[in-house]
Image (spheres, rainbow, N blue to C red):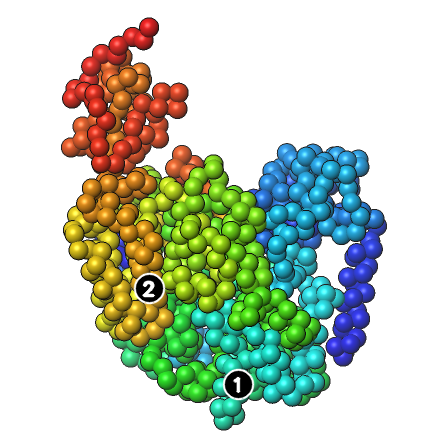
Amino acid sequence: MANPPVGEDTQALLTNQESAIQKSLNEILHSYEGSQDELIPILQQVQHVFGYLPEPAMKKLAKFLKLPESTVFGVGTFYTQFKLMPTGRNIIKVCRGTACHVRGSAQILAEIENQLDINAGETTSDLEYSLETIACFGSCALAPVVVANNKVYGRMTVPKVGEIFNKGAQ
Amino acid sequence: MSFEEIKEQAILQWKIMQQSEKIRILIGMGTCGRAAGAEDILDALDQELAKKNIQVDILPVGCIGLCYAEPLIEVIKPGKPSVLYGNLNTELMSEIIADYLIADNPRPDLAIGTRGDGTLDGIPKLFDLPVLKPQVRISLRNCGNIDPENINHYIANGGYEGLAKAVRMKPQEVIDEIKKSGLRGRGGAGFPTGIKWQFCHDTPGDIKYVICNADEGDPGAFMDRALLEGDPHAVLEGILIGAYAIGALEGYIYIRAEYPLAIQRLQIAIKQMEEYGLVGDDIMGSGFRFHIKIKEGAGAFVCGEETAMMASIEGRRGMPRSRPPFPAQSGLWGKPTNINNVETWSNVSAIIAKSADWYASYGTENSKGTKNFSLAGKVVRTGLIEVPMGITLREILYEIGGGIPENKRLKAIQTGGPSGGFIPESLIDLPVDYGSLTQAGSIMGSGGMVIVDEDTCMVDITKFFLTFTQAESCGKCIPCRWGTKQMLDILIDITEGRGRLGDVELLQELAESVKGNSLCGLGQTAPNPVLTSIRYFRDEYEEHIVEKHCSAMQCQALISYYILPDKCQGCMICARNCPVQAIEGGKRMVHVIDQNKCINCGICFDVCPPKFSAVAKVSGKKPSDIPEKPIPIVAKP
């Protein structure tokens, strides 16, 4: 999945956050022992706290687990859950599973892309919205499904797309 | 407290609840129920009951599988059979409260069916309904009946009987019982479970592991989620029995992070097991020691493959490795490891509690027992079903599923997700068992079953699956990495009008070589959608390649939109909504789409008022009499 372009705002944000990152990371690492099987759970927690995997955090994590930085980076880029760039305050996920596909999720995705003026996998320049696609939510009976900030919208239609922005993601 | 005492207490608690003079309401609170609005219903229910000052016990339960009718509630009045109501909204909820909770009219017009002893006039018995009659509930035995967050409910309904029995048996006896039951792996491949256990049991070693594969990744499949949300203990009990039989002291549940509710319910369940001494250092006082951990997946389809899953648990990139050595010989951290799927584990607990013979009485010669399917796509009654092996696809689609909406024509049934294939309408009487599905070119798979009707283009949906497998291919072996990419490129060309003669043969050749030479199951099965769609729907490929025509009207590049001059009323709605200003025309003028500007988005088609229906969607031929420029509308006589 392509990462969103880095704007100047984003860069500034990154620098400001660096010291905050160090501090939060120390708190996260406190409850771990330092074996490799903890790598993914720690990355998950880092992403949960920051919304993405900041580079300084991954470097520090490599030291903590006594792993090459490349290994941490390799795991961070392998799994689709992990993001290397900040994501929007609101995350909209469009299910692209089979059941959703045969019930028109491509049109729903196109409509959301159109309304936000970004492609799937991107974040709006004001960091307000990130748009993602998900292979399958497992809520196929309610296809097509869109999830906005963990609120599930089932049986979506193109005209109903606006509802997501009106209440769900604010 | 001994297990016997725990059981006694649980049964007592259950009985008190059953015999309570209070009204009870069960509400389906699985992910699907919540998505359909169960939380709003629950809020409305709470408010309304408080306002009217009625005492009711509300019990959140898992999914009973009638997803098409969510949100669902079941009302139990003392001395009466319970009544199930579906497709609820807050207004209907208030009506039911007024009419049935306060007064005594069960509202047959709103009810789906009744359960339990007795009947109510005008309401059918739930399990006599076509959707439930052919079903047999073994794996899903408790889903929708018990509170999944209350271990006592599970125990009161026979839960942990199997484990209590197992720890009194020799491990080999447990394995023999599973072998005798004929249970085969429900994750898709169908390997006999007992034999798998035997391999791991026979490998020497002090440290062994069991893993529960809950990385349900097939798009179109949600059986394992529903089971874990509705009855987590059934799965956990199975894992414990397996661990005992194999001699494992530690276990992992590898579950997708996309299933937060299932994860939460598992955590609660494990905590309750610890309190009851059902997991830990001396389980049921038998000396059996076992600990279990939950590992959340991080979003990689390939991690459903055993060796990739183990790599992921170890904290590495989830890439498969070649086998042998098999996990039973050298698995997690090089130790003997046994991996089974969620549904397999839930069957294990039922088999040991009842008996292998009882289980084997369901199903066919080579496929014993039942199978869970998630029925989705173009079907009237979508949902989670459990059917005996050997049932025909026709029974599943037309009896349980209620057929296809809007009387459309069935085109194919897709089983096994991206690893499976399409079964055409002509094979609708095929029995559902491992052998028959494989022979038809598909697989049993983990249980996704997606119904495809005439509005679906087979080339487009094949492209959809390849897009998925190509993106999920881990890239380790060349046949899968490049083969899926090449197949996808050809499919994109065909759907975008660039198909060439010979593409179908090339696709077949590629598919065979990817199937035969890939390292793991992902690559070995990724060509199945391609091979089956060519086998049964070759004419659709040829139509796209030769005539540049998509009869299902799904391939955007092969579709054009035209405004019909005899129907257009010049209302300008389409012109205002066109995102690329491709529509010319004014008031009382027949509008015209500039085909060079048009991006085939279909918005004009959607917004044209149905009473006019002036926008035609065509593939291939242009309708006659389409003007080049806007012309005045001719007044109708």
Which quadrant would residue B360 be assigned to in this image? bottom right
N-terminal of the two: label 2 or label 1?
1
Decide which of B111, B395 is in the foreground and name it. Answer: B395
Report the quarter where the N terminus of chain B lies: bottom right
Residue drawn at (76%, 72%), measured in percent from left and top? B7
Q: Badge 2 local density, few (<14 within 10 Å), some, or many (20+)?
A: many
Please, what secondary structure does the residue beneath circle 2 have?
A: loop
Image point (28%, 17%), residue name:
B566
Q: Amino acid at mark 2?
A: Ala
In which quadrant will I find the C terminus of chain B? top left
Q: Which residue is mark 1?
A: B198
Left or right: residue B604 versus residue B367 is: left
Instruction: Identify whether B22 is placed above or below B600.
Output: below
Residue at mark 2: chain? B
> Where's residue B363, x and y in %?
58, 66
Say which of B158 and B512 sits in front: B512
Q: Can residue A122 be seen in the rendering of this structure?
A: no
Position of residue B604 in the picture relative to residue B25 (left or right): left
Q: Nearer the viewer, residue B334 or B46?
A: B334
Residue A122, position in %: x, y?
29, 51
**Residue B322 visible to the viewer:** yes
* Secondary structure state at the residue bearing disc 1: helix
Q: Residue at x 56, y 87 (%)?
A: B247
Could you tell me residue B444's position as x and y percent?
46, 64
Compute the Cα span from label 2 to label 1. 30 Å
Q: Is residue B185 above or below residue B52?
A: below
Residue matched to label 2? B526
